């Protein structure tokens, strides 16, 4: 169970499907994420930016990684992202399929 606690899920939104795919390919290719799910239909986001309420269509990425890769993953997402302040939200994984978690850890090591 201790090893599962090192697994993280990261949420990132992008303004285009092309940008989402570019980030996904890069971070998996560099071994910073084991898998990235891209929600292919846009989500509608409502947010406050520079004092105004904005609305945008965005594409959500769900990245699976480990705690050890978070710093490098965030740096790569920021490097590739078009947003001034990209979303990068990290969630701890409490558990899951032993085989999947083993594969995930091996994929980013």
Image (cartoon, grey):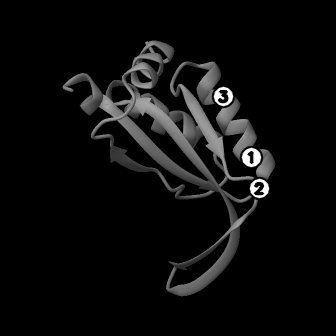
Horizontal side of residue 71 vs 6, given as left or right: right
Q: Helix, strand, or loop for circle 1?
A: helix
User: How many angstroms separate mark 3 from mark 1 (CA)?
Assistant: 11 Å
Q: Tell me: 41 left or right of 37.
A: right
Q: Residues within 10 Å of mark 1 (few under 14, many from 20)?
A: some
Residue shown at 30% from the left, 36% from the top: 95
Image location of residue 26, percent across then percent down: 66, 28
Farthest bottom residue? 52
* Crowd rating for badge 2 (residues with CA inside 10 Å; few <14, some 14–19, many 20+): some
Asked if the residue under mark 1 is in contact with the one under mark 3, i.e. CB atoms within 8 Å, the reply is no
Q: Quadrant of residue 92?
A: top left
Residue holding disc 1: 19
Which element is circle 3 on? helix
Q: Quick check: marks 2 and 1 in contact, CB under 8 Å?
A: yes
**First-in-chain label (3 vs 1):** 1
Q: Judge left or right: residue 42 versus residue 91.
A: right
Q: Nearer the viewer, residue 11 or 94?
A: 94
Q: Are marks 2 and 3 in contact (CB under 8 Å)?
A: no
Residue pointed to by mark 2: 16
Tell me if residue 2 comes above or below residue 9 in the rendering: above
Quarter of image, res 36? top right
Q: Is residue 10 above or below residue 60?
A: above
Residue sitting at 21 percent across and 26 percent down? Answer: 1
Q: CA distance from mark 2 to mark 1?
A: 5 Å
Q: Nearer the viewer, residue 100 or 109?
A: 100
Q: Which residue is mark 3?
A: 26
Work out whether 36 lies above or below 59.
above
């Amino acid at each position: 169970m201790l090893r599962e606690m090192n697994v993280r899920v990261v949420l990132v939104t992008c303004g285009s499907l092309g940008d989402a795919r570019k980030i996904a390919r890069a971070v998996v290719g560099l071994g910073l994420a084991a898998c990235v799910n891209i929600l292919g239909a846009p989500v509608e986001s409502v947010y406050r930016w520079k004092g105004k309420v904005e609305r945008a269509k965005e594409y959500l990425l769900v990245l699976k990684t480990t705690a050890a890769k978070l710093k490098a993953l965030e740096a790569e997402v920021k490097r590739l992202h078009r947003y001034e302040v990209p979303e990068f939200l990290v969630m701890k994984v409490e558990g899951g399929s032993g085989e999947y978690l083993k594969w995930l850890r091996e994929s980013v090591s």
